[in-house]
Image (cartoon, helix red, strand yellow):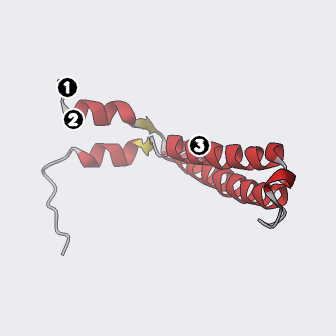
Amino acid sequence: MGDDSDVSKRRHIDVPMPIFKAVTVFTTFFAVMAIIAGLLLIDRGTDRARAPPDEVNLWVTALGVVLIVLAAAVYAFSTRFTPAERANDKGDSSQSNNDG
C-alpha cells in the first residue's frame, strides 16, 4: 500500500502563481459558460420541458448533457493545480495552527 501523502502529491501539480491564477480564472469561466450553454440546449431540446417524448430533440438534449459533463471534468481537472508557494506551506509542521 502507498502512503496517503504520496497519493496526494501525485494528484497535485505545482505551478507558479501567475499560471495558477490564469488556469483558475479561465477554467472556471469555461465551466460556468459550458453549464449555462448545456442547460440552454437541454431547455431548447425539450421545448422548456413541455414537449411530448416523441418530439424531444435528442441530439440537442444530448449535446447539452455532454457540455455539462465536460464542464464538470474541466473544473475537476483544474483543481489539481496548486501554486508552488502554497504547496510548500502544507507540509510545514513548524507553523502553529491557530484557527480560533
Q: How many marks?
A: 3
Q: Is residue 8 left or right of residue 61?
A: left
Q: Which residue is mark 1?
A: 2
Question: Residue at image x 35%, y 30%?
Answer: 10
Real-space Cα distance between discs 1 and 2?
Answer: 6 Å
Horizontal arrangement in the rendering, residue 95 relative to residue 50 (left or right): left
Q: Residues within 10 Å of mark 3 (few under 14, many from 20)?
A: some
Q: Are marks 1 and 3 in contact (CB under 8 Å)?
A: no
Residue that appears at 27% across and 49% down: 89
Depth order, front residue of 16/25: 25
Which quarter of the figure is the C terminus placed in? bottom left
Where is residue 35 drawn, in percent x and y? 68, 56
- Residue beneath disc 2: 4
Say which element carries label 1. loop
Of the residues under marks 1 and 3, which one precedes in the sequence? 1
Q: Is residue 13 left or right of residue 23?
A: left
**How far, Cα to Cα, is label 2 from label 3?**
24 Å
Q: Is residue 28 above or below residue 62?
A: below
Nearest the viewer among 46 and 41 is 46
Disc 1 and disc 2 in contact, CB within 8 angstroms = yes
- Tell me how far mark 1 sits from mark 3, CA to CA: 27 Å
- Which residue is at 26% across, 48% downward? 90
Q: Amino acid at mark 2?
A: Asp
Q: Position of residue 85 (x, y in %)?
A: 37, 46
Q: Amino acid at mark 1?
A: Gly
Residue 74: mark in rendering? 3
Mark 1 closeness class: few <14, some 14–19, many ≥20 residues within 10 Å: few
**Residue 88 relative to residue 68: left or right:** left
Name the N-terminal-most of marks 2 and 3. 2
Q: Amino acid at mark 3?
A: Val
